[in-house]
C-alpha cells in the first residue's frame, strides 16, 4: 500500500487550469499549487494570467506560469499546448475549467451564434485541449484530466439552456474520453459544482433581489459555497488518491440531486 500521507502530494507534477484567473478556477489553481504542483494559469488575457501566476507563486511557494489562451478558438489551442511543453516539458494534470454562461435568454430567442459561442468554449475547448494533452500524458505514463461541468447539466434551466446543454454534453464526453484513454493510464473525470460565490452570482443578485436565497435553497445545506470548497475534490481527482476513479462525475453541490 502506498504511503497514505503522500497520496495527495503533487510535487513534480505540472497542471494546466484553464479559466484560472478568478473564481473557482483560481481557487483550484492555488489549491493544486499548495499540493506541490507547478501551475499553468490560463485565460484570455496574458497580463492577467501573469499577474495571478505571480500571486499564486508567492502565496504557495510553488512555481506558477501564466500562459494565455482562448479555448473557444479551436485553432489557437495547439500553440498553447506547445508553449506549455516548451517551457515545462510535461503535463500531468489538465483541468478544463474555462466556461461561459451568457445572459438569460428564452429558448425561443436563442440565436445560432449564441449557441455556437457557448459550445465553442464549454465543450469544444475541453475536447480540443484534451485531444492534444492526452497523448502527452500517455507518453509520460499517465495523467489526470478533470472537466468542470455543472449541476445544471442534470437539471437543465430554461433561461440558461445553452449553458446547461453544453455541461450535459461535457459530462457525457467525459465518459467517452475515459473509455478511450483508460489503456493509456489517463484518467478522465468531471466535477459538477452547485452554487458557488462568483462575480456571476453577485451580478445576478444585484439585478434580481433574492437570487442568492433562491439558489442556496436548492441545496440541502441551504447555502452558497465559497470558491475554496472546490479545492479538496479537484486535488483528489488530480492525485494518486483517486487512482481507481475514472469516467465519473462527482457533484460538489451541498446535496443537490442529480
Image (cartoon, helix red, strand yellow):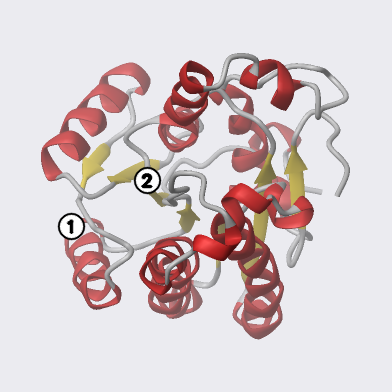
Residue 240 in view of the camera? no
Up-down: is 77 above or below 215? below
Q: Give the mark toward the camera: 1 or 2.
A: 2
Q: Nearer the viewer, residue 149 or 210?
A: 210
Residue 174 at x, y percent in the picture: 65, 69
- Name the quadrant containing residue 165: bottom right
- Name the quadrant containing residue 124: bottom left
Crowd band around label 1 with a 10 angstrom C-alpha radius: few (<14), some (14–19), many (20+): few
Q: Nearer the viewer, residue 157 or 191?
A: 157
Up-down: is 185 above or below 218? below
Residue 29 at x, y percent in the picture: 42, 36
Please state if 204 lies on the left or on the right of 120 as rendered. Answer: right
Dot 1 falls on a residue whose secondary structure is helix
Please state if 159 lies on the left or on the right of 253 as rendered. Answer: left
What residue sits 60% from the left and 39% below the top?
235
Residue 87: mark in rendering: 1
Crowd band around label 2 with a 10 angstrom C-alpha radius: few (<14), some (14–19), many (20+): many
Counting residues from the start of the chain, the first of labels 1 and 2 encountered is 2
Residue 167 at x, y percent in the picture: 61, 59
Give me the C-alpha separation between circle 1 and circle 2: 20 Å
Residue 19: mark in rendering: 2
Please state if 218 lies on the left or on the right of 106 as rendered. Answer: right
User: Dots 1 and 2: beta carbons under 8 Å?
Assistant: no
What residue sits 67% from the left and 52% below the top?
158
What residue sits 22% from the left and 42% below the top?
65
Residue at the farthest left position: 47
Please state if 186 lies on the left or on the right of 69 as rendered. Answer: right
Up-down: is 113 above or below 42? below
Residue 154: mark in rendering: none
Residue 152 at x, y percent in the picture: 69, 49
Dot 2 falls on a residue whose secondary structure is loop
Residue 184 in view of the camera? yes
Amino acid at each position: 500500500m502506498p504511503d497514505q500521507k503522500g497520496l495527495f502530494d503533487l510535487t513534480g507534477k505540472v497542471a494546466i487550469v484553464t479559466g484560472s484567473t478568478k473564481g473557482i478556477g483560481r481557487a483550484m489553481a492555488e489549491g493544486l499549487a499548495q499540493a506541490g504542483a507547478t501551475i499553468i494559469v490560463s485565460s484570455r488575457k496574458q497580463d492577467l494570467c501573469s499577474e495571478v501566476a505571480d500571486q499564486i507563486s508567492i502565496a504557495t511557494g510553488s512555481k506558477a506560469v501564466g500562459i494565455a489562451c482562448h479555448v473557444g478558438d479551436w485553432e489557437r489551442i495547439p500553440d498553447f499546448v506547445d508553449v506549455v511543453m516548451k517551457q515545462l516539458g510535461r503535463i500531468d494534470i489538465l483541468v478544463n475549467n474555462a466556461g461561459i454562461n451568457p445572459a438569460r435568454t428564452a429558448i425561443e430567442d436563442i440565436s445560432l451564434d449564441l449557441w455556437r459561442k457557448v459550445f465553442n468554449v464549454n465543450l469544444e475547448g475541453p475536447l480540443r485541449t484534451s485531444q492534444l494533452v492526452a497523448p502527452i500524458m500517455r507518453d509520460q505514463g499517465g495523467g489526470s484530466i478533470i472537466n468542470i461541468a455543472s449541476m445544471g447539466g442534470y437539471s437543465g434551466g430554461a433561461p440558461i439552456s445553452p449553458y446547461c446543454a453544453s455541461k450535459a454534453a461535457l459530462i457525457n464526453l467525459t465518459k467517452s474520453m475515459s473509455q478511450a484513454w483508460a489503456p493509456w493510464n489517463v484518467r478522465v473525470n468531471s466535477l459538477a459544482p452547485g452554487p458557488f460565490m462568483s462575480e456571476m452570482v453577485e451580478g445576478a443578485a444585484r439585478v434580481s433581489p433574492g437570487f442568492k436565497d433562491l439558489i442556496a435553497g436548492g441545496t440541502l445545506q441551504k447555502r452558497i459555497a465559497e470558491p475554496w470548497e472546490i479545492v479538496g475534490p479537484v486535488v483528489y481527482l488530480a492525485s494518486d488518491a483517486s487512482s481507481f476513479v475514472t469516467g465519473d462525475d462527482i457533484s460538489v453541490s451541498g446535496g443537490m440531486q442529480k
